Amino acid sequence: MEALNIPYTEMGWGFIVGLAVGFFLKKSLKIALFVIGATILVIFGAEQLGIVTLNEEVLQDTVNGGIEAAKGVAGMVKERLLAFSAGGASAALGFVAGLKMG
């Protein structure tokens, strides 16, 4: 009897962890961008109606702060995945595969 060839069952646990992290990050980034975009559209609409006044410098500072936070998280994930298993290569490849799948 021949065994079934199921994808990812022959991969190491480093690859699987990287795959899960990459998949989760891509999905959560899509959700976060959707929420941020909707919020910005509501704020722009409220400004157009004269309900609020938008300070563009504060908005730009907030966006820059978010970008810096994202860079910090990306650096932490990269550092952790590379140190995860022997050389971290399998975890890094799993992470890239997870990003593609997500």
Image (cartoon, rainbow, N blue to C red):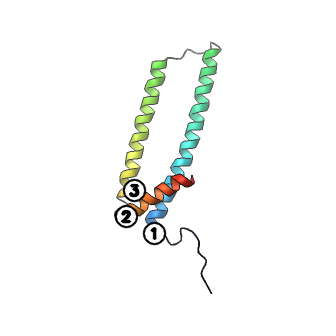
**Residue extending furthest top?**
50
Q: Where is residue 44 shown, x and y percent of the image?
A: 60, 21
Whole-percent x and y of residue 87?
34, 63
The residue lying toward the viewer, choosing from 73 and 2, is 2
Please name the amino acid that badge 1 sits on: Gly
Say which residue label 1 marks. 12
Q: In terms of sequence position, does the residue under pointer 2 or pointer 1 come before the other?
A: 1
Judging by the rendered image, the residue that carries numbered circle 2 is 85
- Disc nearer the start of the sequence (1/3): 1
Q: Classify residue 56 as left or right of residue 88.
A: right
Q: Which mark, residue 81? A: 3
Marks 2 and 1: CB-CB under 8 Å? yes
State the residue at coordinates (49%, 19%): 56
Q: Quadrant of residue 28?
A: top right
The amino acid beneath tag 3 is: Leu
Say the numbered circle drawn on residue 72. Answer: none
- The amino acid on which the numbered mark 2 sits, given as a three-letter code, is Ser
Dot 3: few (<14), some (14–19), or many (≥20) neighbours within 10 Å? Answer: many
- Residue at the image point whose x is 59% and y is 81% from the top: 3
* Neighbourhood count class around disc 1 (C-alpha, 10 Å): few under 14, some 14–19, many 20 upward: few
Quadrant assignment, res 31 = top right
